[in-house]
Amino acid sequence: MIEAKGLRKVYSNGAKQLEVLKGVNLRVDRGEVLALLGPSGAGKSTLLHLLGGLDIPTAGEVNIGGKPIFSLSDTERSRIRNEKIGFVFQFYHLLPEFDALENVLLPMLIMGKGGKAGRVKAAELLKAVGLEDRMRHKPGQLSGGEQQRVAIARALANEPELLLCDEPTGNLDSGAGRNIIDLLWELNKKRKMTLIMVTHDAEIAKAARRVVQIRDGAIV
């Protein structure tokens, strides 16, 4: 499904250079659940952003479905992100002036798939994540766990093949966090999508089918 080859990421600050990723190689099969485990500052989130084409590597390549995404134009890479990849972040990034249904509808509007059919689909996704009674609530009226469920529903709006999650339980208490992990695993089983999750929590990582540990910018 996705393969990283020799990924390096170096940030420059004047004469100083910080090498965050040091030639990472990673292959993830279709339908696999993978946890990227490591301490803060290990390079986990940087790797996830490169895998999703949100950032550009200093060196190396990422292939999604056999297609090298950094050889594509910005427009083509954006299209792949919107069509094939769903993102779930630690901070939910919901638009506060929109209700839950409207937040989930946004990716479909970008694809020109809004309208009545889009609203029906958004409602179905919110029902799938257990929020059928909260569709008209704005983010400020929802708990942290509920906001993360809205973010997950939004990530599923365009039926992605790949779901990338960056510390999706980092802002939640242990009970709500466990519920989010259970929901993600259930979605993986039902939809057969590939799931890659960044976490610093070894207990959460243990639930994945494979755990890759990252330390100091390298897979160990």
Image (cartoon, grey):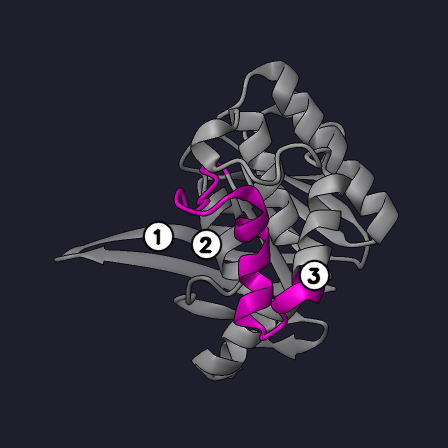
- The extreme right residue here reads 190
Q: Residue 186 carries which label?
A: none
Question: Reading the chain from its start, which is encountered first: label 1 or label 3?
Answer: 1
Q: Please provide the residue range marked out in magenta.
A: 90-118
Q: Mark 1 to mark 3: distance in Å?
A: 31 Å
Q: Mark 2 to mark 1: distance in Å?
A: 7 Å
Q: What element carries label 2?
A: strand
Contact between marks 1 and 3 (CB within 8 A): the answer is: no
**Of the residues shown, which amino acid type is indicated by label 2?**
Lys
**Is residue 37 shown to the viewer in this render?**
no
Q: In which quarter of the image is the C terminus?
A: top right
In this view of the protein, which residue sits in the foreground, 29 or 31?
Answer: 31
Left or right: residue 125 compared with residue 146? right
Circle 1 is placed at which residue position?
A: 19
Q: Where is residue 177 in the image (x, y as percent from the top left)?
A: 62, 23
Circle 2 is placed at which residue position?
A: 22
Circle 3 is placed at which residue position?
A: 160
Q: Taking 215 as reference, is 6 above or below it?
A: below
Question: Reading the chain from its start, which is encountered first: label 2 or label 3?
Answer: 2
Which residue is at 44% across, 40% downward? Answer: 216
**Of the residues shown, which amino acid type is indicated by label 1?**
Glu
Q: Position of residue 153 (x, y in %)?
A: 65, 47
Mark 3: give few (<14), some (14-19) or many (20+) Cα within 10 Å: some
Q: Mark 2 to mark 3: distance in Å?
A: 29 Å
**Of the residues shown, which amino acid type is indicated by label 3?**
Pro
Contact between marks 2 and 1 (CB within 8 A): the answer is: yes
In the image, which is nearer the foreground, mark 2 or mark 3? 3
Which residue is at 65% across, 78% downward? Answer: 67
